[in-house]
Amino acid sequence: MPEFKCRGCGGLHSIDSKEAEGSCLELMDKLEFEERLDYQCPDAVPAFSTAPLFGEARGQMFGLLVCAPARPGESKIILKAFSGQYNGIWEIPGWVPPILSGEIFSRAVAIADPPIKKLNAEIIGLPDGDNRNSLIRERRKLSQKHMRKIHEMYTIRNFRSGQADLFTLFGKENGIPAGTGDCCGPKLLNYAALKGLRPLSLAEFFWGRENRSGSKQHGCFYPPCIDKCRPILGYMLCGADDD
């Protein structure tokens, strides 16, 4: 696992991946056998089937975080997460919730989407020219404003009881990629910090049909993504490696 620069203390932080990889292999066996994400529930929900991962929708990233026992003598705590939404759903029993609640996210999208869709309809009906280009610029500004409002809703936590927003962690000079904070690693670390757990090992793997670029293959482990996760993981891990 690489080291990540922390915008809080200025140091470098890292976390082991080996122990979590072993637990991920067990999770892969469970997903292959059960063929659903809600395998801890007695009744299967069709929307949580793993079948779409091997079809046109293609695969998705999953991750595990191994945490120290809550009390001496108890077993280690294992948290699991999926990246983004699963089949359009933010929360599934047994998996950690998103940093920004699905309800708040959906409410923000419901407010922002209608004017953007209205502009889309107007743009489609216009021929190439100044009027069309003007509407395209207006749509871009509206989308950027919408994304900024969503990013402002994310509260990123670490293991020194610190909190920061995405703009602080990325720096004002850098843009924030869509989906930042929704990958497995940030979800897991944020949840552990909220619950007062001490993380020991983190690993992420891809499950399902290879992605369209061919950069991710079924059953393979991958480090945190460069554009969305690495700028914030240093801050999120701050305090996790304290004695």
Image (spheres, rainbow, N blue to C red):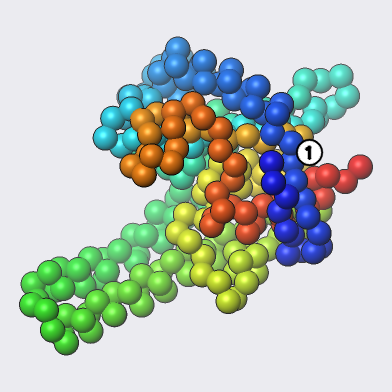
Residue 102 relative to residue 185: left or right: left
Most foreground residue, 100 or 1? 1
Residue placed under numbered mark 1 in the picture: 198
Task: State which quarter of the image contains the C terminus.
Answer: top right
The residue sitting at 8% across, 77% down in the picture is 127
Image location of residue 188, percent across then percent down: 63, 41
Which of the 4 image quadrants contains residue 232? bottom right
The residue sitting at 48% across, 33% down in the picture is 206
Task: State which quarter of the image contains the N terminus.
Answer: top right
Residue 163 relative to residue 167: left or right: right
Q: Residue furthest front?
A: 214
Give the residue type at disc 1: Arg
Q: Is residue 63 above or below residue 172?
A: above
Which of the 4 image quadrants contains residue 223? top right
The residue sitting at 57% across, 59% down in the picture is 154
Q: Is residue 189 above or below residue 207?
A: below
Image location of residue 204, percent across then percent down: 57, 35
Query: Few, some or many C-alpha atoms within 10 Å of disc 1 (few <14, some 14-19, many ≥20)?
Result: many
Residue 180 visible in the current orientation: yes
